[in-house]
Image (spheres, rainbow, N blue to C red):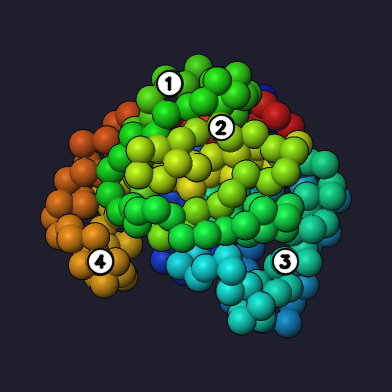
């Protein structure tokens, strides 16, 4: 198991890292930076951390320059990636890292909200982040955009309605999907973003039920992913 301290960058008050943060706290020391409310304070140096997780936000990764806290985070993420230490980006966190690495972030062929299945590629099955994962992975989705795979990276997971679900590039891994969400978090998201439900033609009750059905498997896989991520350190 990893030693050292993990830094979680939380980019939105509603969207935290849920089960990922819980399981990491049970294993190692964790600092959480609320980037959206950091104000004039600086991000911490990268030297004191053994790995980094970049959380989601409803802000598009293509709109970084419109938000001062993301402009500051963008510069920090370049140092994080350059540290060579393991970095995991979740949803928009993965999209920002992909853009930082020169890849495009585009509209997903289909807006995804609710419970879905993603499939690991051969590279995904071989990647240590997904060690001991099933080929077909139950996940929770809430996104409109999709990252491209950075040049020199590999596609780790694909979906039927959104073909690029996860990538790896050297020390960086990005995921569009969520395993860290339980029905309570899904309830908060659905309450915060009712227009998103309307856009995909789903009710809050329907989305929460989709999460509930997949929650036991997602919880087990979220813990496994945390163990795998910490083993990269």
- On the image, numbered disc 1 is attached to which residue? 135
- Disc 4 or 3, which lies upstream in sequence? 3
Alpha carbon distance from label 4 to label 2: 28 Å
- Disc 2 or 3, which lies upstream in sequence? 3
Alpha carbon distance from label 3 to label 1: 33 Å
Alpha carbon distance from label 4 to label 1: 30 Å
- Disc 4 or 1, which lies upstream in sequence? 1
Look at the numbered disc 4 and give the secondary structure of its residue. helix
Question: In the rendered view of the protein, which quadrant contains the C terminus?
Answer: top right
In depth, the one of 58 and 26 nearer the eye is 58
Q: Which residue is drawn at 39% across and 53% down?
A: 109
Look at the numbered disc 1 and give the secondary structure of its residue. loop
The answer to whether residue 119 is visible is yes
Q: Residues within 10 Å of mark 1 (few under 14, many from 20)?
A: some
Which mark, residue 156? 2
As displayed, is residue 195 above or below residue 137?
below
Q: Residues within 10 Å of mark 3 (few under 14, many from 20)?
A: some
- Disc 1 or 2, which lies upstream in sequence? 1
- On the image, numbered disc 4 is attached to which residue? 199
């Amino acid at each position: 198991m990893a030693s050292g301290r993990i830094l979680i960058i939380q980019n939105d008050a509603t969207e935290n890292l849920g089960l990922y943060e819980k399981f990491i706290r049970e294993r190692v020391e964790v600092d959480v930076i609320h980037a959206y409310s950091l104000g004039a304070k600086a991000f911490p140096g990268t030297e004191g951390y053994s790995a980094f997780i970049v959380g989601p936000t409803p802000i598009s990764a293509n709109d970084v320059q419109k938000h001062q806290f993301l402009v500051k985070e963008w510069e920090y993420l370049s140092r994080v990636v350059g540290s060579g230490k393991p970095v995991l980006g979740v949803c928009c966190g993965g999209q920002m890292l992909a853009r930082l690495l020169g890849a495009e972030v585009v509209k997903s062929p289909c807006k995804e909200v609710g419970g879905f299945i993603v499939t690991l590629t051969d590279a995904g099955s071989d990647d240590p982040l997904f060690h001991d994962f099933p080929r077909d992975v139950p996940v929770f989705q809430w996104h409109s955009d999709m990252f491209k795979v950075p040049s020199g990276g590999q596609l780790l997971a694909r979906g039927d309605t959104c073909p690029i679900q996860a990538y790896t590039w050297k020390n960086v891994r990005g995921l569009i999907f969520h395993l860290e969400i339980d029905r309570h978090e899904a309830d908060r998201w659905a309450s915060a973003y009712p227009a998103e439900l309307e856009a995909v033609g789903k009710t809050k009750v329907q989305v929460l039920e989709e999460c509930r059905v997949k929650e036991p498997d997602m919880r087990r896989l979220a813990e496994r992913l945390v163990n795998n991520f910490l083993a990269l350190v």
